[in-house]
Amino acid sequence: MDKRSDTVYVLSGYAKCSVPNNGKYKLGNKHSIGLLTTDENYQSNLQHLTTFVKGLGWDSIMFCMVEQVDDISTLENDVLISSFMRAKENGQSLVVNDQPITMH
């Protein structure tokens, strides 16, 4: 993973909470997720990234969209900005929406 690049890739999707007593997330609920990574080869390394997300207590992971962010100043949300900085420091960062996805 290239931590020197200014580019962060945001993989958006959803995952199901797989750890009981995972703070504010109820076991079995699906949530929207965003995985921020500096890995420009994220497509080839998707298994590694999925393992990272599973290690944080999530399964049934599905990524639906990818956005390339080259400039942190284009981000308006404080959560995404802090996650962008964590990704730059650690190579990747996970953001989970507090509200579960409900099916109608």
Image (spheres, rainbow, N blue to C red):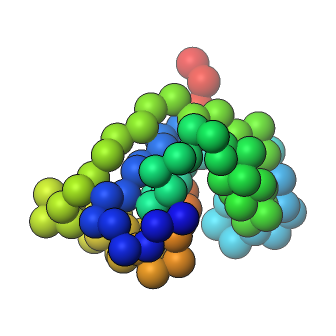
Q: Residue at x 72, y 53 (%)?
A: 48
Q: Residue furthest top?
A: 104
Asked where in the image residue 38 lies, by quadrant, the reply is bottom left
Position of 35 with respect to 4 (left or right) is right
Q: Is residue 60 visible?
A: yes
Q: Residue at x 34, y 66 (%)?
A: 5
Residue 92, x across and y down, in percent: 53, 66
Asked where in the image residue 102 lies, by quadrant, the reply is top right
Asked where in the image residue 66 lies, by quadrant, the reply is top left
Residue 60, x across and y down, in percent: 76, 38
Q: Is residue 17 visible?
A: no
Q: Residue at x 55, y 46 (%)?
A: 42
Quadrant of the image containing the C terminus: top right
Position of 2 with respect to 76 (left or right) is right
Of the pair 28 and 4, the residue shown nearer to us: 4
Of the pair 47 and 104, the residue shown nearer to us: 47
